[in-house]
Image: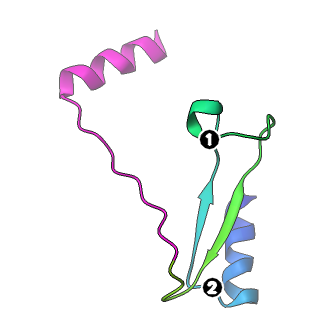
Amino acid sequence: VAQRIGQAEMSVLGAKGVNILTNVGEEAGQTVMHFHLHMIPRYEGDGQNILWNPGTSTPEELEAVRKEITE
């Protein structure tokens, strides 16, 4: 559904791209305590900076997390 809405924003609104965001939990910035998506149409030179600087993990750390999630 989000992909279809994003495609509509691009074709109907002329957006050049779309950011799709969700925040889960207060620590992640959630202020409305139900699931929802932010569909943000993006335009060249729009001045918006939605940045995320991912951390780094070793292969061993990633494997440990994978095991916790899947086992």
Report the front residue among 29 and 37: 29
Q: Residue at x 47, y 16 (%)?
A: 70
Q: Are marks 2 and 1 in contact (CB under 8 Å)?
A: no
At mark 2, the secondary structure is: loop
Question: Local crowd at mark 1 within 10 Å, few (<14), some, or many (≥20)?
Answer: few
Badge 1 amino acid = Gly
Report the front residue among 19 and 28: 28
Above or below for 8 versus 55: below
Quarter of the picture holding the N terminus: bottom right
Above or below for 35 versus 26: below
Quadrant of res 62: top left
**Residue assigned mark 2:** 15
What percent of the width, then of the height, locates residue 37? Answer: 72, 52
**Residue assigned mark 1:** 29
Is residue 31 inside the magenta stretch?
A: no
What percent of the width, then of the height, locates residue 5? Answer: 75, 68
The stretch in magenta equals 48-71
At mark 1, the secondary structure is: loop
Q: Residue at x 38, y 21 (%)?
A: 66
Tell me the CA gap for discs 2 and 1.
Answer: 26 Å
The answer to whether residue 16 is left or right of residue 52 is right
Q: Residue at x 68, y 75 (%)?
A: 7
Badge 2 amino acid = Ala
